Image: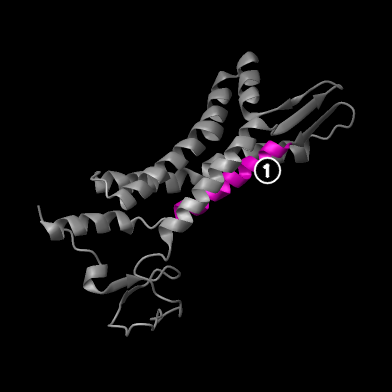
Amino acid sequence: MNAIVSAKSQGLVLCNDCHLVVRQAAVPPGQASYCPRCGSRLHARRPNSLTRTWALIITAWIFLFPANLYPVMTVIYLGEGEPDTILSGVVRLVQNGMIPIAILVFVASIVVPMLKLLGLMVLLLTVQRRWQLNKRQCTILYRIIEVIGAWSMLDLFMISILVTLVDLGAVATISAGTGATAFATVVVLTMFAAMSFDPRLIWDLQEHHDERH
């Protein structure tokens, strides 16, 4: 199998702002090089990618607890109602016979955020521990995490629409809870974590492996 040659080893650098591929000449130590198109500073790899990603992931795990323990929405209909967490909301949907919607909410609000965080942790540990995992599969995993990141906002969009539209005074009211804020924080943090992780670090491992052999 042919050895994998990276753009970095060929002196090519991708501008993180305008995505121009620049052939970077030798730069003296202590000096920086800049993109000729947008003027941004060039980096062969995103600075402190692993540290920033770990910080965002740990913070997201912390917020995940109040997101699932505190109510995300309170529905009052004809003077009756009680706050609902994500899980209790899923149970209520099942009890009302809306099983497809319950499955959608459970997957989008509970399964997907946890799998995204676990997937990012696998990628980080692969780079740091130099695990011999399939690099192509790791890249596909990263792309999936990046693409589905915003879909976890589905519940929040629904809550925001309901809070805005449903205000019938004494008949029916809907209000967002603390859990919704925490859940929104988790979604945003995981999206930032995926953006801060540099997937090229995965392929650097393959290049180092090829050099040793």
Whole-percent x and y of residue 213? Answer: 10, 56
Whole-percent x and y of residue 54? Answer: 46, 51
Whole-percent x and y of residue 70? Answer: 68, 33
Magenta residues (range): 177-195
The answer to which of 133 and 145 lies nearer the viewer is: 133
Identity of the residue drawn at 50% across and 47% down: 57
185 in the magenta segment:
yes
Position above or below: 132 against 115: below
| Quarter of the view holding residue 41 | bottom left
| Quarter of the view holding residue 77 | top right
User: Which amino acid does the dot numbered 1 rest on?
Assistant: Thr
The answer to which of 142 and 51 lies nearer the viewer is: 51
Mark 1 surroundings within 10 Å by alpha-carbon count, few (fewer than 14), some (14 through 19), many (20 or more): some
Identity of the residue drawn at 26% across and 46% down: 131
**In-image side of 125 versus 90 (left or right):** left
Whole-percent x and y of residue 180? Answer: 67, 39
The answer to which of 47 and 99 lies nearer the viewer is: 47
Q: Residue furthest front?
A: 129
According to the image, what is the colour scheme of the structure? one colour
Q: Is residue 153 visible?
A: no
18 in the magenta segment:
no
Position above or below: 150 against 97: below
**In-image side of 48 versus 211 (left or right):** right
Prevailing secondary structure class for the magenta stretch in the rendered image: helix
Identity of the residue drawn at 45% across and 69% down: 17
Identify residue for label 1: 181
